[in-house]
Amino acid sequence: MKPYICAVKCSGIDCARRSFTGRYNREDRTTLHFYTICFMFNLILFGPPGSGKGTQSEKLIEKYGFKHLSTGDLLRSEIARETALGMEAKSFMDKGQLVPDEVVIGMISSAIDQNENVKGFLFDGFPRTAAQAEALDKLLELKKSPIAVMLALEVSEEELVKRLMKRGETSGRSDDTNENVIRARIVEYHKKTTAVADYYKQFNKVTLLPGEGSIDQIFDSLCKEIDSRIVDA
Ligand code: AMP
């Protein structure tokens, strides 16, 4: 597998494992006081429901070859197969609530184990609570490839509701057609999920980006952030 250098500037004690704050400067390699050779580039695409994570994930996977792990997709596949896990999850999803941590963490842990030798994971819709973020860090520690960055898309609430109602016309997702469920998902996002950004902020791993604009504009800004962190070893 091709290794990547997740380039970092030294920002203090313990920085090699914890702080992926630096920007790689091609002109001035001397700024690389510390770097970690990672075998995977792991990225969290973050943002409220309807912020465009799914659309942008597809484009990023095509460009970079990441393995896409969307807990929403995994849960919907469990529901379609009528598994016990799917049936449990459905009752929460139908109300716009989060599925319990232990269910989602178990599911993502198996998905990571089933995908050896990938270039990196693109996590979409996960982690959604601080407990999930801590569990993910532990799982990735075993792979010696931590989260390189969390890219967070910012979109206003009214725009989110508009987009989700529109998506509901064609997506076949029951949680996209009912405005009350949509608003409940946004409330849940503010109540529990924004804590995930706070968790990664302490390691300087969060970059906020505008999630409104054209798909290509947003994609370009995501790519710039990724390219500045990946350097072929
Ligand atoms: P999504 O497709 O990411 O919008 O997720 C749809 C629904 O699946 C959410 O409203 C939650 O009920 C559930 N879900 C997806 N990912 C998670 C997660 N990481 N933790 C808890 N619930 C989740």
Image: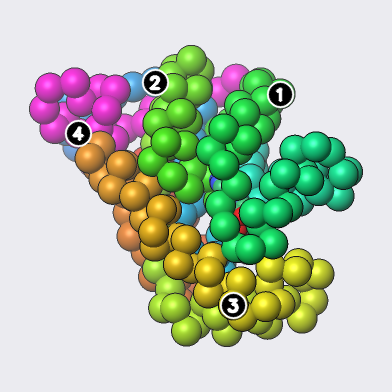
Contact (Cβ within 8 Å) of mark 4 with mark 1: no
Query: Who comes first in sequence, dot 4 or dot 1?
Result: 4
Residue 29: percent from the left, percent from the top?
22, 32
Give how far apart the Cα atoms at labels 4 and 2 are: 14 Å
Tell me: residue 209, above or below residue 13.
below
Which mark is in front, 2 or 3? 3
Query: Is 228 in the magenta?
Result: no
Location of mark 2 (residue): 37
Query: Who comes first in sequence, dot 1 or dot 3?
Result: 1
Residue 47: percent from the left, percent from the top?
46, 60
Determine whether the residue tagged by mark 3 lies in a helix, strand or loop.
helix
Compared across the picture, whether 69 is left or right of 183 comes to: right
Location of mark 3 (residue): 180
Contact (Cβ within 8 Å) of mark 3 with mark 4: no
Give how far apart the Cα atoms at labels 3 and 4 are: 45 Å
Q: Residue at x 25, y 22 (%)?
A: 16
Q: Nearer the viewer, residue 109 or 89?
A: 89
Location of mark 4 (residue): 9
Residue type at the position of mark 3:
Asn
Location of mark 1 (residue): 114
Query: Who comes first in sequence, dot 4 or dot 2?
Result: 4
Residue type at the position of mark 4:
Lys
Which mark is in front, 4 or 1? 1
**Badge 4, how many Cα within 10 Å: few under 14, some, many 20+?**
many
The quadrant of the image that shows the C terminus is: top left
Q: Indicate if the residue with disc 1 has its beta carbon within 8 Å of ligand 1.
A: no
